[in-house]
Image: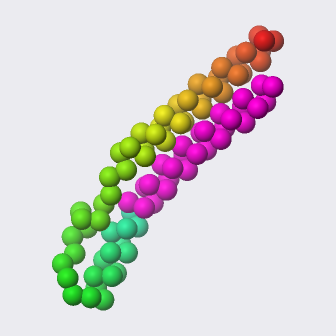
Amino acid sequence: MKKSGFIVSMIGILLGAATLVMTSVINEVTPKIALIVFQTTTGSYTPIDFIMNFAFADTVAIVLIVCGLVFGAYCFVSEKRGG
C-alpha cells in the first residue's frame, strides 16, 4: 500500500519539475521565434513583448513538488514504523 504512495508522490514531483522546465523553455524560445518571424516581415520587434507570465503555473508546479516531497517523506516514515 505504501508503494502506491511513493508512486503518487513521484508523479507529483515529476509533473511539477516538467512544468517548471516547460515554462522556462517556452520563455526562452518564444522571443527567438518572434525575432525570426519579424525578420521576414515588416514590423517592430521587442523581446519583452513576447515574455509570458507563468507565475501561477510555476507556483502550482512548486506546490506539486513540495507536496510530493512531503507525502513521500510521510510514506517513508510510516513504512519504517510499520504502520
Q: How does the figure colour the protein chain or chains?
A: rainbow
Percent position of residue 54, x then y: 37, 50
The quadrant where residue 37 appears: bottom left
Quarter of the image containing the N terminus?
A: top right
The quadrant where residue 52 appears: bottom left
Residue drawn 77% across the image and 15% down it: 80
The one of 24 and 60 positioned closer to us in this rendering: 60
Where is 77 relative to 15, above or below?
A: above
Figure disc tally: 0
Percent position of residue 50, x then y: 29, 65
Percent position of residue 70, x then y: 59, 25
Quarter of the image containing the C terminus?
A: top right
What secondary structure characterizes most of the magenta part? Answer: helix
Where is 28 relative to 75, above or below?
A: below
Residue drawn 20% across the image and 82% down it: 43
| Left or right: 25 in relation to 69 | left
User: Is residue 22 inside the magenta stretch?
Assistant: yes
User: Is residue 18 inside the magenta stretch?
Assistant: yes
Which residue lies most toward the left here?
44
Where is 61 relative to 18, above or below?
A: above
Percent position of residue 21, x then y: 50, 53
Magenta residues? Answer: 1-27
| Left or right: 5 in relation to 20 | right
Residue drawn 32% across the image and 52% down it: 53
Residue drawn 72% across the image and 36% down it: 7
| Left or right: 65 in relation to 26 | right
Where is 42 relative to 29, above or below?
A: below
